[in-house]
Amino acid sequence: MKTRILGFAALAAVAAMTAIALFVVPADLNQGDAQRIMYPHVASAWLGYLSFGVTAISGILWLWKRDLRFDAIAVSGAEIGVMFTAFAIWGGMMWGRPIWGVFWQWEDPRLTTTALLLALYVGYLLFRRLTDDPQRRATRAAIVGIVAAVDIPIVHFSVEWWRGLHQTATIASPDRVLNPAAPMIFVGTLLGMLGAFTLAWGYLMIRRYQLARAELAREEAVRIGRLEDARRGVARSEAAR
Amino acid sequence: MTDAGFVIAAYAVIIGGLGLYTVTLWRRLNSARRELDRDDEAR
């Protein structure tokens, strides 16, 4: 019930923030309407980081505690992170064409490291399919998830470390939130969209976690069923002897 | 394409994708739960 309420709250918040971003906030003086893409783009990028961070931390907790619930959280983070990172890339491309004149530029460190991050976690999801044993799968996936997470700070700080097309962070510290480079109405809308997307992220994480747990229970049931079939087979062959 | 076209393309894919993923997730979750219930009944 609480999850359902969270779902409705997320739906209302995303709908409201989309309407505000598209119809209420004025267009940017320099970038025009294209600047409106920044709201879902930045929110998606942050949630991509958060999701993959959750995957890496859950991977560490799995290796430490050996509790498959952490693996269920890890796979949820990876799948949802892939979706949000793909949204961030798409939004960035739609903004880049009218503002930079190009959809994509491989020489840009932020773009390239983000594409690498997406590829790493798509690989993580594919890697999980290589084995049916939940324990072995969780261990291997945890290692991949932790190693792949090294790219998260590289993506984030790439705009500070190297020169490229992508601008540096508009909001990088609490001081920049209070004294942002952009007008308050833009920053407020950005934070509002971030909040709305985070609600949606929370809802999706809970539902994806429930799915991962149900899939694990199903795998376990199939395994027990196979064991019982095998036991019955052995008992039958012994009775026939 | 105009700026508005890029804005529509961006929002359509992001908001539409979010909705589509949510619906797909519900269906996957319901299907997994149904299978579990069927297993329980079979036992």
Image (cartoon, coloured by chain):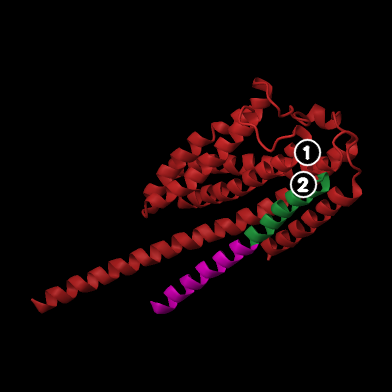
Q: Give me the C-alpha separation between circle 2 and circle 1.
A: 8 Å
**Which image quadrant is residue A143 in?**
top left
Q: Are marks 2 and 1 in contact (CB under 8 Å)?
A: yes
- Amino acid type of the residue that numbered disc 1 sits on in the rendered structure: Pro
Q: Which residues are magenta?
A: B23-43
Q: Residue A185's x, y, as percent?
A: 90, 40
Q: Residue A117's x, y, as percent?
A: 56, 37
Report how many numbered discs are placed on residues in the image.
2
Q: Nearer the viewer, residue B11 or A16?
A: B11
* Image colour assigned to chain A: red
**Label of residue B36 in the image:** none
Q: Residue at x 58, y 46 (%)?
A: A82
> Horizontally, is A101 left or right of A29 in the view?
left
Residue furthest to the front: B1
**Label of residue A98 in the image:** 1
Q: Residues within 10 Å of mark 2 (few under 14, many from 20)?
A: many
Question: To which chain does the residue with label 2 belong?
Answer: B
Dominant secondary structure (helix, strand or loop) of the stretch shown in magenta: helix
Give the SS element for disc 2: helix
- Which quarter shows the N terminus of chain A? bottom right
Let me know if residue B25 is in the magenta part: yes
> Horizontally, is B24 left or right of A179 in the view?
left
* Image colour assigned to chain B: green
Q: Residues within 10 Å of mark 1 (few under 14, many from 20)?
A: some
**Which image quadrant is residue A51 in?**
top right
Q: Residue A174's x, y, as percent?
A: 78, 30
Residue located beneath label 2 in the image? B6
- Amino acid type of the residue that numbered disc 2 sits on in the rendered structure: Phe
